[in-house]
Structure formats: structure tokens, C-alpha cells
Image: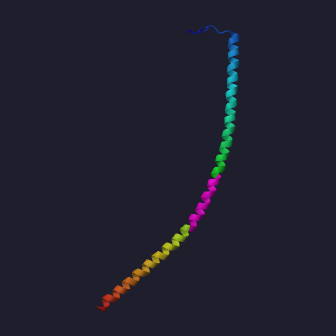
């Protein structure tokens, strides 16, 4: 089946075509406005979630600071213990060597 294509466009047809195109673009503009509103509300929710995550990171940082101070004191205690034990072993070996 062949469709007939009109080769001549009258002013009336062009005016009608222009009105239809304008109506379609108006609908597209409305859709974009709706999409912008949805995006704004969506970004607001994302911002709130990021603030919650930031708050959680602050809490984790505080906990890690406490753990770091505990680990630091534990490391110092272990180093002093190793030095004390090494000194005791060296003193014991020195005592054994000097008595023989």
C-alpha cells in the first residue's frame, strides 16, 4: 500500500501543524518541570542521608580515638615489659657466666 504524500503545504495546514507542535512541546515542558520537582525532592532526601552518614562517621571516629589511646598505652606497656624481661634474661645469663 502506498501512502499519498502531499507535496504542497498550505498556510492553514502549516498553522495547524505549528499549533500541534507547540502543544507537544508544552507537554514536554510540563514533564520536565515534574522531573525537576522530583529531582529536587530526591536530592533533598540524599542530602539528609549524607548528613546521617556524616553523624555516624563522627561517632566511629570518636570510638576509634578511644581505641587508639588504649592500643597506644597497651603498646607502651608491652615495650616496657619486653625491655624488663630482656634485662632480666641478660642479668641472669651474666650471673651464670660470671659464676662458672
Task: Give the x, y percent position of residue 36.
Answer: 67, 37
Is residue 4 found left or right of 92 in the rendered image?
right
Q: Is residue 76 above or below residue 37?
A: below
Give the residue at the far bottom of this rendering: 99
Colour scheme of this structure image? rainbow
Q: Quadrant of residue 56?
A: bottom right
Q: Is residue 66 above or below residue 84?
A: above
Q: Tally the numbered discs.
A: 0
Q: Quarter holding the N terminus?
A: top right
Give the residue at the far front of this rendering: 1
Task: Give the x, y percent position of residue 64.
Answer: 56, 64
Is residue 82 found left or right of 21 in the rendered image?
left
Find the magenta span and give its range: 51-66
Task: Give the x, y percent position of residue 39.
Answer: 66, 39
Question: What predominant SS class does the magenta segment belong to?
Answer: helix
Q: Is residue 94 above or below residue 82?
A: below
Q: Which residue is drawn at the image coordinates 70% and 22% (left, top)? A: 23
Q: Which residue is drawn at the image coordinates 64% and 50% (left, top)? A: 49
Q: Is residue 9 above or below residue 18?
A: above
Q: Which residue is drawn at the image coordinates 40% and 80% (left, top)? A: 86
Q: Quadrant of residue 55?
A: bottom right
Q: Quadrant of residue 59?
A: bottom right
In the image, residue 70 lies in the stretch drawn in magenta: no
Q: Quarter holding the C terminus?
A: bottom left
In the image, residue 62 lies in the stretch drawn in magenta: yes
Q: Which residue is drawn at the image coordinates 67% and 9% (left, top)? A: 10
Amino acid at each position: 500500500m502506498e501512502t499519498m504524500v502531499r507535496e504542497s503545504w498550505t498556510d492553514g495546514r502549516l498553522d495547524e501543524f505549528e499549533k500541534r507542535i507547540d502543544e507537544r512541546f508544552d507537554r514536554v515542558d510540563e514533564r520536565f518541570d515534574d522531573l525537576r520537582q522530583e529531582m529536587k525532592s530526591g536530592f533533598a532526601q540524599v542530602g539528609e542521608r549524607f548528613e546521617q552518614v556524616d553523624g555516624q562517621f563522627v561517632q566511629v571516629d570518636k570510638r576509634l580515638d578511644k581505641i587508639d589511646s588504649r592500643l597506644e598505652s597497651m603498646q607502651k606497656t608491652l615495650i616496657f615489659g619486653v625491655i624488663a624481661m630482656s634485662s632480666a634474661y641478660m642479668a641472669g645469663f651474666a650471673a651464670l657466666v660470671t659464676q662458672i
